[in-house]
């Protein structure tokens, strides 16, 4: 039987979505919240023995799904029903989601705390200043001109509590090994995604400009 990661059906999926599903399938994440479609995406999940629930209305061009084993999704939903109405509902939602997504307790605690007024004001290119990891990463880049490339393997839903968090680094190291072993294309897409965000792009600006130029030339060549 062919490795599912080598099939045409798998390759047809968005590479970032592939990364998310792969990490769940390899047991590195209990669940994922990811994009997909109503055709090949569902067939792949069935073949992997994973379940899903739609977070968007049926028929949308770019639906979002919660993916995981049936029992894990069931427990995830059950916990939402037990959230007390005490004014801290949003914090509880972040905690439950963080645990389902398989992130370290310290990172969940940091992400689910109430933000300061200054953090709430951070928008646009300043959004990274709304959490400690982003502020620390910017400071590290401005001081040293680089950062640990292990942070380039963060799924879109994961924000470490600190650039010094050993739990986050260990988890991301496991992500990197699984992705590069099973789906190097998905690994590269995740890295590119993170390097295009701010402040990471401060380190990779020249590389990104070359890549964009190459893509434009390739697009023009293929259309002639």
Image (cartoon, helix red, strand yellow):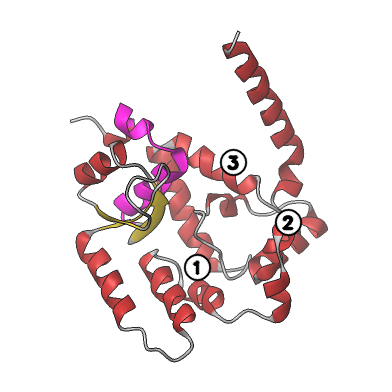
Label 1, residues with CA under 10 Å away: few <14, some 14-19, many ≥20: some
Is disc 2 placed on a helix, strand or loop? helix
Q: Tag 3, which secondary structure?
A: helix
Q: Is residue 91 above or below residue 7?
A: below
50 in relation to 81, above or below: above
The residue identified by callout 2 is 125
Pick out the residue farthest to the left. Answer: 1
Residue annotated with mark 3: 192
Residue located at (38% from left, 55% from top) = 56
Report the residue marked by disc 1.
167
- Comparing labels 2 and 1, the label whose residue is closer to the camera: 2
Can residue 29 be seen at all in this image of the molecule?
no
**Crowding at label 3, few (<14), some or many (≥20) Cα neighbours within 10 Å?**
some
Could you tell me which residue is drawn at 44 percent across and 82 percent down?
89
Indicate yes or no whether the magenta region holds residue 14.
yes
Q: Quadrant of the C terminus?
A: top right
Label 1: which secondary element: helix
Q: Answer whether labels 1 and 3 touch (C-beta < 8 Å).
A: no
Left/right placement of residue 190 relative to residue 46 reads right
180 lies above or below 125? above
Q: Earlier in the sequence, mark 2 or mark 3?
A: 2
Q: Residue at x 27, y 64 (%)?
A: 73
Inspect this view and state whether residue 149 appears.
yes
Q: Which residues are magenta?
A: 6-27
Disc with the residue nearer the chain's start (1 vs 3): 1
Which image quadrant for residue 184?
Answer: top left
């Amino acid at each position: 039987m062919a490795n599912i990661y080598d099939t045409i059906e798998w390759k047809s999926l968005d590479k970032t979505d592939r990364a998310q599903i792969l990490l769940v399938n390899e047991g590195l994440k209990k669940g994922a919240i990811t994009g997909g479609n109503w055709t090949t995406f569902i067939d792949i999940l069935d073949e992997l023995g994973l379940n899903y629930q739609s977070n968007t209305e049926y028929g949308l061009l770019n639906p979002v799904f919660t993916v995981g084993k049936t029992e894990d999704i069931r427990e995830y939903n059950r916990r939402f029903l037990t959230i007390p109405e005490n004014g801290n509902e949003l914090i509880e939602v972040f905690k439950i989601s963080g645990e389902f997504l398989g992130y370290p307790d310290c990172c969940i605690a940091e992400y689910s705390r109430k933000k300061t007024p200054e953090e709430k004001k951070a928008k646009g290119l300043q959004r990274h200043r709304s959490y400690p990891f982003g502020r620390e990463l910017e400071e590290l880049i401005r001081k040293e001109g680089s950062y640990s490339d292990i942070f380039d393997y963060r799924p879109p839903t994961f924000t470490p509590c600190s650039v010094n968090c050993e739990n986050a680094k260990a988890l991301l190291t496991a992500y990197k090994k699984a992705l590069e072993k099973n789906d190097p294309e998905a690994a590269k897409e995740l890295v590119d995604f993170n390097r295009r965000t701010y402040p990471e792009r401060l380190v990779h600006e020249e590389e990104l400009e070359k890549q964009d130029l190459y893509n434009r030339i390739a697009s023009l060549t293929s259309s002639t």
